[in-house]
Amino acid sequence: MFNNEYSKKDKINAKKYGNELGISLVIYMIVLFGSIAIAKPMENSWLRTLIVLTPTLPFLGAFWAIIRHFRRMDEYMRVWVLEVIALAGGITALFSFSYGFLEGMDYPKLSGFIIYGIFMTSWFLITLVRKFILEREQ
């Protein structure tokens, strides 16, 4: 589906989603940098742990914006997005499973942020392939 094929309702919903997600991400970044600045010089303690975890709160706002947007989608788009998520999850699982064997051979352990990055990159690339290559062939 290309931009001129979206309905007025879809465009309104996309704008709402962009605003909700954008506000959440701005708050997230402010809290993230603030928590790092405050927690970095502190000694390890339960208070420092709580401060370091504070960016998860605005992230919940972003998560809520995504859920709301998903519920506003029509059935076709919902299935389309779920297929992309399933494929990205499969690629991430394959990578994680394979890399687990390499860790057994003394390869470095990977951070959860790396795994998350692989999932999001897979999601992005699959979306690009499906949207701009496969749909143009049909």
Image (spheres, helix red, strand yellow):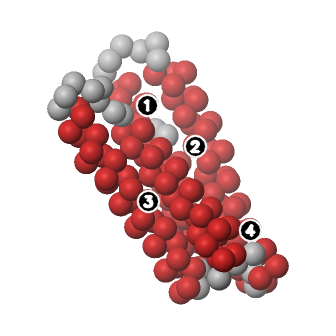
- Return the disc, 4 or 2, that comes first in the chain's sequence: 4
**Which residue type carries mark 2?**
Tyr
Badge 2 crowding class, 10 Å Cα cut-off, few under 14, some 14 to 19, many 20 or more, is many
Q: Position of residue 101 (x, y in %)?
A: 20, 39
Placement of 64 over or under 2, stated as above or below:
above
Q: CA distance from mark 3 to mark 1?
A: 32 Å
Q: Nearer the viewer, mark 4 or mark 1?
A: 4
Count of number-bearing discs: 4
Q: Is residue 33 visible?
A: yes
- Return the disc, 3 or 1, that comes first in the chain's sequence: 1
Q: Is residue 112 left or right of residue 73?
A: left
Q: Is residue 98 left or right of residue 134?
A: left
Residue of label 3: 88
Residue of label 1: 51
Q: Nearer the viewer, mark 4 or mark 2?
A: 4
Q: Position of residue 111 (x, y in %)?
A: 36, 34
- For numbered disc 1, what is the local secondary structure? helix
Q: Residue at x 51, y 29 (%)?
A: 35
Q: Nearer the viewer, mark 3 or mark 4?
A: 3
**Which residue type carries mark 4?**
Lys
Q: CA distance from mark 4 to mark 2?
A: 20 Å
**Which residue type carries mark 3?**
Ala
Residue of label 2: 28
- Return the disc, 3 or 4, that comes first in the chain's sequence: 4
- Return the disc, 2 or 3, that comes first in the chain's sequence: 2
Residue of label 4: 15
Q: Nearer the viewer, mark 2 or mark 1?
A: 2
Q: Nearer the viewer, mark 3 or mark 1?
A: 3
